Amino acid sequence: MRDYILKRILMFIPTVLLMSVIVFFIIQLPPGDYITSYVSRMSAEGEVFTSEDIARLREQYGLDKPWYIQYFKWMKNIITEGDFGYSFAYNRPVWTVIMSRLPLTVTVTLIIMIFTYLVSLPIGLYSALHQYSVGDFIFTGIGFLGLATPNFLLAIILMFASFKLTGDPLIGLFSEEILREGLKLSNLGSFLKHLIIPIVVIGTSNTCGVIRTIRAQMLDEITRQYVLTARAKGVSENTIIYKYCLRAALNPVVSGLAGSLSSLFSGSTISAIVMNMAILGPVLYEALKTQDMYLAGTILLTQGILVVIGTLLSDIVLAWLDPRIRYAERSS
Amino acid sequence: MVLQNVMDRNKRKEEEYYLASQWTLMRRKFKKHKLAMASLWVLGFLYFVALFGNFIAPYNLVAYNSKIVNAPPTKIHMFHEGKYIGPFVYGIKMERDPVSKRKMYIENKDEIYKIKWFTHGSEYKLFGLIKTDIHLFGVEQGGVVLLMGADSMGRDLFSRMILGSQVSLTVPFAGAIISFVLGIIIGGIAGYFGGAIDSVISRIIEVLSALPTIPLWMALSASIPPDIPVVRVYLYITIIVSFISWTGLARIVRGKFISMRKEDYIMAARIAGVSTWKIIIKHMVPGFMSYLIVSLTLGIPGMIIGETSMSFLGLGIRSPATSWGVLLQEAQEITSIAMHPWKLIPLFAVIITVLAFNFIGDGLRDAADPYK
Amino acid sequence: MDRKESIVQVNNLHINIKMDEGILTAVRGVTFHIDRGETLGLVGESGCGKSLTCKAILAINDPKCSTSGEILFNSDDGVVDILRLPPKGSEIRNIRGKQISMIFQEPMVCFSPLYTIGNQINECTRLHITKDKKKSREISIEMMKKVGIANAEKRYDQYPHEFSGGMLQRALIAMALVCNPKLLIADEPTTALDVTIQAQILELIKELQKELKMSVLFVTHDLGTVARMCDRVAVMYLGKIVETGPVEEIYLSPKHPYTIGLIGSVHKIGSKRKERLYSIEGTVPLALNLPAGCGFYDRCHCRIDGVCNVKEPEPVEVGPNHVVSCHAVGQKTGEEGHDIE
């Protein structure tokens, strides 16, 4: 078990390095660079730039060199000084910009994730055990609808509904009082109220996926020979469901943990743009539009690394859950 | 004699059951899935409409009329003052509500515009080949028929929905095919040859899957140059959308290849001298083809939502082309929906299409296991 | 219960399965009994309903099966009809694993891969014998040793995928017998094993049966195993028992045409080298929408038109403890049945 964990941790490093190369390559793909969009924006406001001005700006920001040299410089700074570059738009080091939003992003994502699994596990179990019942059809139906609706539109509909029903559209994560006084225990309630729509919007597709997975896996497990054997031993139905079937059914769910983390980042990005949430998503969007290279690259890289860490953790949990995996690793 | 007949009868029934080919069995089982069959019809209808889009839509993409900005859907009447005169619409007059000062559109009962079938309208190329200007229906000069209302620039939403469906329905489909091919080739190579090649490819797949899709799409979409022809934008979007899904398929294919590689029948084929290529195509691929098709079908909804999301954010299809995602940009503000709820109609089109593909994928998955 | 010595009496068991294509009449009126301490063999081709019958005794059939008839069991609390007990209730769970146990064909899939063998064997011990952790563990390890698992202490904490096929079958037997049941149902326990392992497992079962004084219902399609293990044999075809009798009777003078065919198709020591093996014509039909009359009609050599394809044959006693269901034999009561040579 220990060797397995060690091996996975070691693989982490080349993966992250490869990721940084790919991310950087993609980030600098757009024709032109920050200077181009900056110039066009400034020109629209009436400023005039000569080609020398532009060349000088480029040199000042280090944007005149080919992309692989820029990449190496970036990497060097990260590894030696923890300097993730400079955000042209915000006029601050990238790290400060990110840190101002990262804790909130991670918190919200974790809350949504926990909520997702808390809701989907019992529902999936119920659906599997009461196949074709009314409840099963209702949940399956809602599930399908949830999967089919693009979440940013679901956000708009829900905000609209909330506005019509309660007069408060629940835009953003923080109500006015939180913005004024900061997040305290007293206004935690307001924070949680504002979280309802994001949880529903961002968490739905994930929840539906997990429900379907659990339902399918449980239905599969219940027909297995070892279930029949256990029953023949006199084991109670409840023990069969929870000790044997559910644990086996959790296998694909745990495998999918990293994937759902990735999709949570994905979903939250657009929803955050629409719902005006102060997390990383909208920042990335702006950075991409203005070609604020280092900021965009670092955000992408951060999200990617978090997902890889998630994969690592889920692999470890999986090995604990299923002894066959530990054995396979040992013998191969 | 009697014995022979009885035995034959039983045998034939059993043979029919047990010897049916894989595809016949799948088809039979699929037909039992009511939702999947219904979805097949729905999608067939949608794609048919898209194919004949330019013909069915009364207006083209650039037609606009500032006099009918944000107009509600026009009502189609059959009777005027008690008399039946066939389908027609009244003229539209714009007035301001005295209290809220908001624009209101009311019917001008003095003007009657009959709806004509197979009228002449704007020119277009049917299927991109045949030049013609005949549209399925339209109204006489001076009138407008807005089956789904108008947008903020006075353009007919119904026409834009149909023409937008041409993009929204084909991008995911084409993207799916591209990722299918990419997935099989790359996954196959990784799985079949193993070793260093497998390691490298697996690492790349891992990295690409770890990066969250929408941020990745956003980044890739941002790199589409601003002044290129619409067709090329369309092509790039398709490639971008297929870009992520191929990793999932590749992983599946790779896994199947690895487990199959060790099977005896592959070794037998190799000993018999069958070429590598033939082994892959004839022996390995049919083994997991059904599984792949299911994965593919279930991946299309993701691409639909992806393209819609990108276009919604302004990073996808650009004018003059349109897609459902672009149309939904108008539905961004709550106030907009409150006053002009018809702008949400493209949302339902998206939901129905995604649901349809989901059901079909489910039906295919059930069908792929016919003896259960 | 008819006989005082019986522990199980199955009366007129019918099992129907509802399928898309119609109703599958899998078991069509099966009657037999098992006495204390004896081994009854249940022989028949795949699909004749043997497994369903066995699982019905423990009431572990799929809910899609509708069962009717009587299965009387001489339990600790008197005679009970297993089919009348609530299938998820505590009475039947008190019988399963404790008074009646079952072992299955493929031991590899009978254990959950997520828990150790010891855990799963001990589950039985803790359910029926004692809840004391230490004591139950000792009992389980003792049983593992008894079935011949070397290094039982170490093996106890290992997972199923670390065991070989033969080992797993021993573990399965340990799990089934740890509570000393009155009846062991063995559903083709050696079919999936090597020939040498087969012999060992069969020996083991026989030893344990003598030691624990239990009855065994041995289901198989291998006539050699039957000859070795069983006291009495019931031959099943298409959901019905066509012949029951002491093992020597069945082998030396089979009466039912199907049994005759079965015995005749086994390769015998001493027969000439170049002789062709006999095989029964035709194949087992699907038990779907069966025509009236005897199920063996299509393939029978001695069928009587107008009788065999109209009425089901009733069981007729042709010798001590020897019962046959066949019109041809019924009509010739007193005559010898003929063998295929």
Image (cartoon, grey):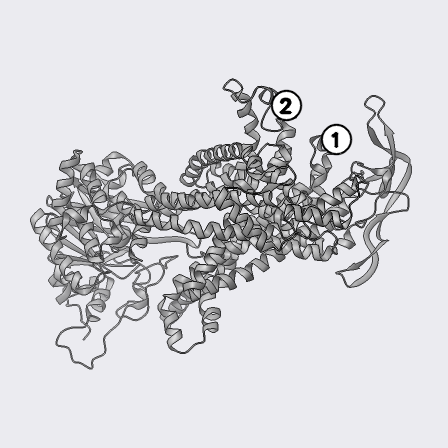
- Cα distance between the residues tagged 2 and 1: 18 Å
Residue under label 2, please give it.
A168
Q: Residue at x 12, y 63 (%)?
A: C249
Residue under label 1, please give it.
B339
Q: Chain of mark 1?
A: B
Is the residue under label 1 in contact with that under label 2 (CB below 8 Å)?
no
Q: Residue at x 18, y 42 (%)?
A: C73
**Label 2 crowd bin: few (<14), some (14–19), many (20+), radius 10 Å:** few
* Residue that extends furthest to the left in the rendered view of this protein: C211
Residue C162 is left or right of residue B150, and the answer is left
Q: Position of residue C121 (x, y in %)?
A: 20, 44
Residue sitting nearer the eye, B23 or A84: A84
Residue sitting nearer the eye, C203 or C100: C203
- In this rendering, the answer to whether C106 lies above or below C9 is below
Q: In the structure shown, which secondary structural element does the residue marked by tag 1 occupy? A: helix
Is residue B368 something one can see in this rendering? Answer: no
- In this rendering, the answer to whether A82 lies above or below C328 is above
Q: Position of residue A299 (x, y in %)?
A: 56, 42
Q: Tally the marks.
A: 2
Residue type (three-letter) at the residue carrying disc 1: Met
* Residue that extends furthest to the right in the rendered view of this protein: B110
The quadrant holding residue C59 is top left
Residue type (three-letter) at the residue carrying disc 2: Asp
The quadrant holding residue A283 is top right
Is residue B371 something one can see in this rendering? Answer: yes
Q: Position of residue A324 (x, y in %)?
A: 31, 51
Question: Which of the labelled discs sits on residue C187, or is there none?
Answer: none
Q: Nearer the viewer, mark 2 or mark 1?
A: 2
Q: Residue at x 18, y 65 (%)?
A: C195
Q: In the structure shown, which secondary structural element does the residue marked by tag 2 occupy? A: loop
